[in-house]
Amino acid sequence: MPAVASPPAPTSPSDRRGKYVVAVCCLDKKARSKPMRHILNRLLSYGEYSIVIFGDKTILDEEVENWPGCDFLICFFSGGFPLDKAIQYVKLRKPFLVNNVVMQSLLWDRRIVLAVLDAMGIPTPPRLVITRDGGPKIDPEAAEAFEQCTGMDLYRIIAKYARNTKEIKVEEDKIEVEGKSMNKTFIEKPADGENHNINIYYSKEKGGGGRRLFRKIGNKSSEFDPELSSPKEEGSWIYEQLMETENSEDIKLYTVGPTFIHAETRKSPTVDGLVKRNTDGKEIRYCTELSSEEEEIARKVSKAFGQTVCGLDILRVSGKPYVIDVNGWSFVKGSDYYYDQCARLLSEAFYRSVQRRPSMVDTVIPREIAPEHSWRIKGFVAVFRHADRTPKDKSKISTQAQPFIDLLDGSTQEVVFRQKHQLSLVAQAVDKSLEMQHPDADKLRSLKEILEKKWDLPGTKVQVKPQFDKDTGDVKKVQVNVKWGGEFTHAGLHQARDLGENLRKDMNILNPNIMDDVKIFSSSERRVRATADVFARRFLGQPESIEGVISESKSLLDDSNAAKEPGDSVKRQLKTLIRPGHEISQLQLAQVGWPKDMPQPHVVMQEISLIMSRLRQIMRYNWTIKDVEQIQRRWCCFESPALFRERWEKQFKNFCDHGSGDESDEADIRNRIHSAPDPAWIPELYDALKYDALHNRPFLQGIFSDPDTSPQSTTESSDAGSMDGNSSRGRPSTDSTGAAFYSGNSDLRKLYKYVRTMFDFVAPQEYGISDEEKKSIGLLIGLPLLKSILSDLRDIKYSESPKTRLYFTKESHVHALLNLVYLSGVPTKIPRNALHELDFLTQITFELYERNRHSGDGKEYSLRIGFSSGAHYKDVLDIHLDAEHCLKVAPRTNLIPHLSLEEVLAYHNSYLNLPNLESIEQQIEERKLYYVQEDNQ
């Protein structure tokens, strides 16, 4: 792409004003999205602008008179946005508008959009319109603005749709409206432009039935319904002939004024409803060239609706374009070139507006609406789970051997060995015990073999837990746990970098001064500390040194045994809940968000065991007939085929019978399955599935592909495969194995679905089933962290300057803190059971806002708690992977609305007033883990 020159800067405003103020008036979900951050940060880099994000607090809660003043306004509608308030603001303050605000209401009715397109001479698919609501409702001010833009009377343009349709005749294979007929196959669209539930009715020649289109959910944008055959009998609808497009694609156009138009193709949702996504979770699209006719259409649409930044959808049919939708403000996602051009063109537009109307920036903005005295973030406190890691594994033995008891060195608590020279002490204890011909010799030899194999692997550690004689109080034996894996990966490196960079851009827009006082706390776990280190460098702008920024805090963020007993009790309850034949009540299933279309959990567990038995047979057979070293040429994260097999054999041992593994009769397999697989094994299996789907997908697919499945039959069975293969542009398939994976690995896909469902059931409830259990376990794990956060918020409130405080920890602490937030009684916008799993880099954020409209001490404080499920995507097997094997972090959503700081503190301070608080804190102190003295070896 050509280099982009910096735009000419507008003449500086009065010294009293400082920089020009660019305001962003849209809901936070849009204003703080990644594309908006990219554009605004580029505007900031020009040096002439300051940015004010109005935010949900101002837009939804404040009167228009209290909204910040500005020179230039970026304002656009999305669901829940009060457009009427924005129109009032524009009338009151008269800023320069990027997109005409009042005209955005014209996009709410598809009949108005289509009538305008007709008037502008823009081609659209053949259609019939049925009106049953008296016709479109038009804002008179929007009609006036439209006439100023186009010179046309909007009321005359839409006159043909301004009355109810009188004659409607529906037949089996066609629809007739006031004498005009349309044969199936046709599309049925609601007149309401914000309703995206669209139906397709197929002709007999196409097989009949219908397809329901909807806003993308996971990897689906539509689904076939064989019973969908009759158009709606109520409401107002638009019927369009389904047109056969080139390559079964439609084209998304994005304008930034009349001179810049970006275009991308995507697979049409009318094809099969399967959405191919990249590791950002975004739909895979391809840039395309536009014809001069298509570019002119985009310019006409942008001008007619008064939307400088505008999106529209077109179809190409036999080389001719047809517009099918106009979207208003739309971003291109993931294109630096687009962000450069958008920022440049917006700045040039601002410059021209000042040249035309210099007086617009002469007036000093009154203090009470000056951006610096409006609601502005003053404190950012957040808790993060670490980034991507390798799967964790462990082995346990109990022994009375004295050399192992000596490893405690007199400690009455669990002792942890992590560094290589420390692990050698454990190996020496094994050798000494074997020399003593200890009765536990078989166990010890097994332990020695594990240590020899694993102590060189990153993340290996040994925990020695004493068990005492009840009578004498002496140590009678120790439990030795060897754990390995759980190590920071290259994907984790990219995730932490991206999150640090994106959060820096976010804070730079909201309040750059918040970066001046940053403190980061990390647990001592290697993967957690590595996440914090990588994140901090990007968040702080890659300084030469981050010395002194990050502190280790084991007491706040490391593991503890304080919640072991209640945690073990909950796990026993879960095992009972999922025992064979146990029916959980519908009320309890609803409380945990169990899917309606799933059978009882115990049935799903049995299905998992059955599928695992089949996959074990397939893997073992493929190991004998395939050159496993050639299935996947490149391995990452210290992986190998042998480690892959070791990991999966352990899972098979957990979920399958203990037979020879060569059973062929499925009924016999069912009889030999474990009667009750332990639900505690589910997180480990889910971890292995996700890890291998991301990092070892070629091997996962290859080793679990059924050799009896015909490649020809699988290819023919998949629309997705044929779609990718028939692209005339020669684009690569969005899945390297194509359709064979969808059919040949159907068991693997079913397994993933069932295990994910069980994980969503098991994982949150391991931290408590009842509210009382959640609270008890939450306090024993998360009380020190909660107290630190509350202290941070109070400190920031009374501080003279903004501050940032960040905590990096493990999944257990995030679960605990999340439960404490929900059980505090604070009003929440999202039910706890609606949250996704707490994936890598899950975040709980506390944003403290301050406003000081009048001089003096009358400052106001508002707090909002946010949540992100981290690097999470529901259907990992559908993600198109790149070399990073890296899922991007999901945007944050708001757990609570903006509330006063004191109100939120009062809810959470209730934990600090518990009558048994001292007992809880004593238990936490007594049960914390002890580590062997570590050094830098």
Image: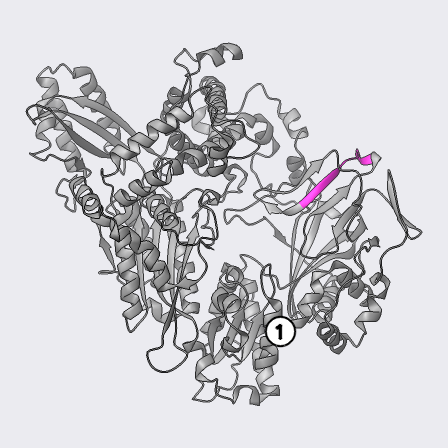
Label 1 element class: helix
**Residue placed at 62% from the left, 52% from the top?**
286
| Drawn side of residue 543 relative to residue 96, left or right | left
Q: Is residue 253 above or below residue 408?
A: below
| Drawn side of residue 634 relative to residue 523, left or right | right
| Drawn side of residue 207 relative to residue 282, left or right | right
Q: Is 280 colored magenta in this rendering?
A: no
Q: Quadrant of the C terminus?
A: top left
Q: Which residue is mark 1?
A: 87
Q: Quadrant of residue 771?
A: top left
Q: Quadrant of residue 394?
A: top left
Q: Of the residues shown, which amino acid type is indicated by label 1?
A: Ile
Q: Which region of the structure is painted magenta?
A: 205-213
Residue 505 point in image, percent of width and height:
43, 64
Q: Quadrant of residue 412?
A: top left
Residue farthest along the front direction in this orientation: 915
Q: Is 209 colored magenta in this rendering?
A: yes
**Residue placed at 65% from the left, 32% from the top?**
718
